[in-house]
Amino acid sequence: MTNAFDEMRGKDGSPRRAYEAVAAWLNATPPEVLAAKREEAERLFRRIGITFAVYTEGADTERLIPFDIIPRVIDADEWAFLERGLTQRVRALNLFLKDVYGTREIVRAGLIPERSILLNPAFRAEMQDLAPPGGVYTHIAGIDVVRVSADEFYVLEDNCRTPSGVSYMLEDREVMMRLFPDLFSRCAVAPISRYPEDLLETLRSLAPPACEGEPTVVLLTPGQFNSAYYEHTFLADEMGVELVEGADLVVDDGRVFMRTTQGLKRVDVIYRRIDDEFLDPLAFRPDSVLGAPGLMAAYREGGVTLANAPGAGIADDKAIYRYVPDMISFYLGEEPILKNVPTHDCADPDSLAYVLDNLHELVVKEARGSGGYGMLVGPHATKAQRAAFAEKLKAASSVYIAQPTLALSTCPTFVESGVAPRHVDLRPFVLVGADRVRITPGGLTRVALKDGSLVVNSSQGGGTKDTWVLRATNAAAGGK
């Protein structure tokens, strides 16, 4: 998109103040040096073993996510604005979840149709009238944000279930600090190394009523064949907690224990990285071997805390997304700080008719899809592709939502042809404890490595960048 906002350069071609040090570094660094550094970064990632899985591509599914060595820079004022907007949004989403599984006042007020909640596959009736510790349902949120101008940020998606990617954020920073220490010394970059500590403090703040003394936290993984298993092991190691599978857990008399070489040990908080339906075969899928029988009963009795709460996924459903501004107004009495993308629910006949007439300029997504699969980017699709997708829409309209294409901002990226602009998004990670909200300065910047592409997902060929938030003390060098 030719009208995309260039995050590094102003309209006159000169570097924006936040990017002055990076621009000078790029001008002074020969392309062959950048290429050598990129190869070194790839060797480091291979040595670390940080991979993700693509299950749709045959036997060899393990891959490295491409890493771009040119950092994305956000100045202190921009970040302060984002931080306020993220805090507001996650507060409203948690209040919505409390309401959804309570008296549903937002439905009574006529702001959200009840069928959009009760018929939603992410709604868990088992959570009705269950009050989690601190009233928090989504403890770890990944909010996908895009930028379209110097002052405009839109939320593309709210990830309230089991958001992933934070290990890449942390490892990207480690690699950048190793490769470019001189550049770091010239920029006052806010640290992100506290994330595991903040995550552990957040989880400990959510200890259940039955907890006695210091709460014991574990991370529950589906196992080594999960696409995010590296991240599960990484976070457990960084927090210094046990990584467990369902078979390691035992529920007895409303309490949860894990098997150890010294016998059973009490568990108070479970950071679960498995989907709702696999958590407990007595409550959800009876054929699941990934969770632990009786886990939901112990949760309901206050014997353990599950983070994120089962049923939190209804808050990040793409069909529910369009109501978030209403949630902010209804629950907080505030105007939204971060914008929503106008969204058409194809389940509505009038919206479907509009979408079918305007496929050439819309992005159509599965309401419950992820990873960039099953979507149509209208402006980049052929006439035949749009016609085929229109038939899919007519056959299963309730599955899809549609949005206008946004001119996602670009950042300089080192590609085969040299340094070139590529579209980016940002996934900041928001931690919500019973005590307070914690937000790591930055997040995971994902970059569409294909020229002109707007799809940043790693499963679709996207890569990642280190995200540098400049400290407030560097404001003179980090303004707009």
Image: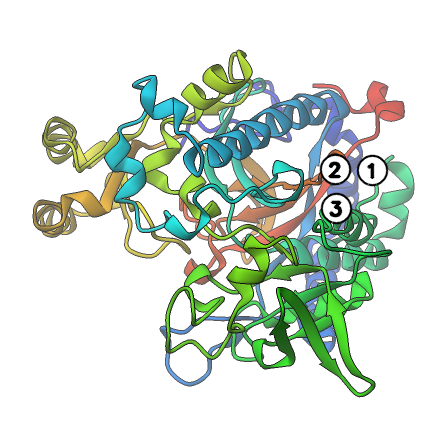
Q: Secondary structure at mark 3?
A: helix
Q: Residue at x 23, y 34 (%)?
A: 345
Query: Which amino acid, mark 1?
Result: Ala
Residue 194 at x, y = what percent? 83, 48
Q: Secondary structure at mark 1?
A: loop
Q: Which mark is residue 335?
A: none
Q: Which residue is mark 1?
A: 190
Comes first in the chain, label 3 or label 2:
3
**Neighbour tally class for label 3: few under 14, some 14-19, many 20 plus, Cα within 10 Å:** many
Q: Which quadrant of the rendered structure holds the N terminus?
A: top left
Residue at horizontal 40 percent and vertical 23 percent from the top: 105
The residue shown at (45%, 34%) is 102
Q: Are marks 2 and 1 in contact (CB under 8 Å)?
A: yes
**Which-is-in-front pick, marks 1 and 3?**
3
Mark seen at residue 202: 3
Residue 207's x, y, as percent?
A: 73, 50
Instruction: Return the residue at label 2.
Output: 441
Amino acid of disc 2: Pro
Mark positioned earlier in the residue sequence (2 or 1): 1
In the image, what residue type sits under mark 3?
Answer: Thr
Judging depth in this view, the residue of 383 and 272 nearest the camera is 272
Q: Position of residue 218 (x, y in %)?
A: 71, 65
